[in-house]
Image: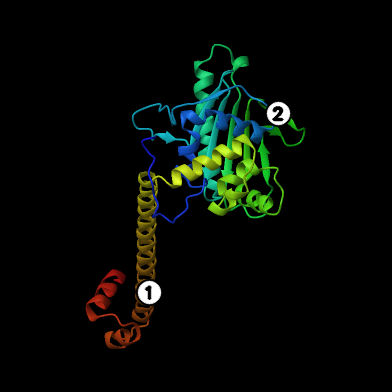
């Protein structure tokens, strides 16, 4: 029995493959290099050689640089590098962050190589939720927008619209079923038949969801994230409340300044603004 396996009979929560830890648990398992290879082949629509998963922390240039942890980093026998990122939100900063990942690895290869013409291909595959009705697949290359001329040929970024792919699968379009399965609920898996990749991913999803220790870890990680988000929202609301209070106070002080300049007495200013006499005296002193 795998050390992660358990019974998990009482657990009713289902964790799909779009959960980042579930996703990594499936595709970074060395026993699943075959389905990782198939996934990349179907995403790129071309055959590749066998792949192996690399260390997911990119090299740091100095002790002060923050470590970059990628979701999946793999390499085939020809030295081509594949970075797969699962994005739960379509925030623009993720494009910047993810490009930083693949560019960092690209830079390492350029520095280490002996010939600039023999740098490996670098391909990033982004699986992104929340893109709405955007295209199912976008392919990004470095090209001249007027001449459609490539600046470099060996760095390409693919972005797949996870939600749209699942909707298309649900409506009968199986073109991207190898990605759609990551969004499957438990009952969706009953429709998986025959295909080796689909059957194996199905088996891994079922196995890991039955694994008590693994799902408890996911639940704890999810709870920590919710607590962090809750605290962030509390601090944000407190900050907004404080900002409003500061704004109101400033407005009262500005009114008091105008009334002082009009030579009105402290009692009148206090009634109009709610400021105390000491506060009004300080404003008078600052204007003198």
- Residue 67, numbered circle: none
- Tell me residue 151's x, y (percent): 67, 27
State how far apart marks 2 and 1 are (Cα): 56 Å
Which residue is pictured at 38% across the width and 46% down the height?
7
Residue projecting furthest to the top: 114
Height in image: 243 above or below 106?
below
Q: Quadrant of the N terminus?
A: top left
Q: Secondary structure at mark 2?
A: strand
Which residue is pictured at 23% across the width and 81% down the height?
277
Q: Secondary structure at mark 1?
A: helix
Count all numbered tags in the image, as a single digit.
2
- Tell me residue 194's x, y (percent): 64, 39
Looking at the image, do the residues carrying marks 2 and 1 touch, with CB atoms under 8 Å apart? no
Height in image: 253 above or below 99?
below
Which residue is pictured at 35% across the width and 45% down the height?
213
Residue projecting furthest to the right: 147
Q: Nearer the viewer, residue 288 or 232?
A: 232
Q: Nearer the viewer, residue 113 or 43?
A: 43
Badge 1: how crowded within 10 Å, few (<14), some, or many (20+)? few
Residue at which label 2 appears: 150
The answer to whether residue 96 is visible is no
Which residue is pictured at 47% across the width and 26% down the height?
54
Residue at which label 1 appears: 248
The answer to whether residue 178 is visible is yes
Disc nearest the viewer among 2 and 1: 2
Q: Quadrant of the C terminus?
A: bottom left
Height in image: 210 above or below 121?
below
- Tell me residue 112's x, y (percent): 49, 16
Q: Nearer the viewer, residue 52 or 130?
A: 52
């Amino acid at each position: 029995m795998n050390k992660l396996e358990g019974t998990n009979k009482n657990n009713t929560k289902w964790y799909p493959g779009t959960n980042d830890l579930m996703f990594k648990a499936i595709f970074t398992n060395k026993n699943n290099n075959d389905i990782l290879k198939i996934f990349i082949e179907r995403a790129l629509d071309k055959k590749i050689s066998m792949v192996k998963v690399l260390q997911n922390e990119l090299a740091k240039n100095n002790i002060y640089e923050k470590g970059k942890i990628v979701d999946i980093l793999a390499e085939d026998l020809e030295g081509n590098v594949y970075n797969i990122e699962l994005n739960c939100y379509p925030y623009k900063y993720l494009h910047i962050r993810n490009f930083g990942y693949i560019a960092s690895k690209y830079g390492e290869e350029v520095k280490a190589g002996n010939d600039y013409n023999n740098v490996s291909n670098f391909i990033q595959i982004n699986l992104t939720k929340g893109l709405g009705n955007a295209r199912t697949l976008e392919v990004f290359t470095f090209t001249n927008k007027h001449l459609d001329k490539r600046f470099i040929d060996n760095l390409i970024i693919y972005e797949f619209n996870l939600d749209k792919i699942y909707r298309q699968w649900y409506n009968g379009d199986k073109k991207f079923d190898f990605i759609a399965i990551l969004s499957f609920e438990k009952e969706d898996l009953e429709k998986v038949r025959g295909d080796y990749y689909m059957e194996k991913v199905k088996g891994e999803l079922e196995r890991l969801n039955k694994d008590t220790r693994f799902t408890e870890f996911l639940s704890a990680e999810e709870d920590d994230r919710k607590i962090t988000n809750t605290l962030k929202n509390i601090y944000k609301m407190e900050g907004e409340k404080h900002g409003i209070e500061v704004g109101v106070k400033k407005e009262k002080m500005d009114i008091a300044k105008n009334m002082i300049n009009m030579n009105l007495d402290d009692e009148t200013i206090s009634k109009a603004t709610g400021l105390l006499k000491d506060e009004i005296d300080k404003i008078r002193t600052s204007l003198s």
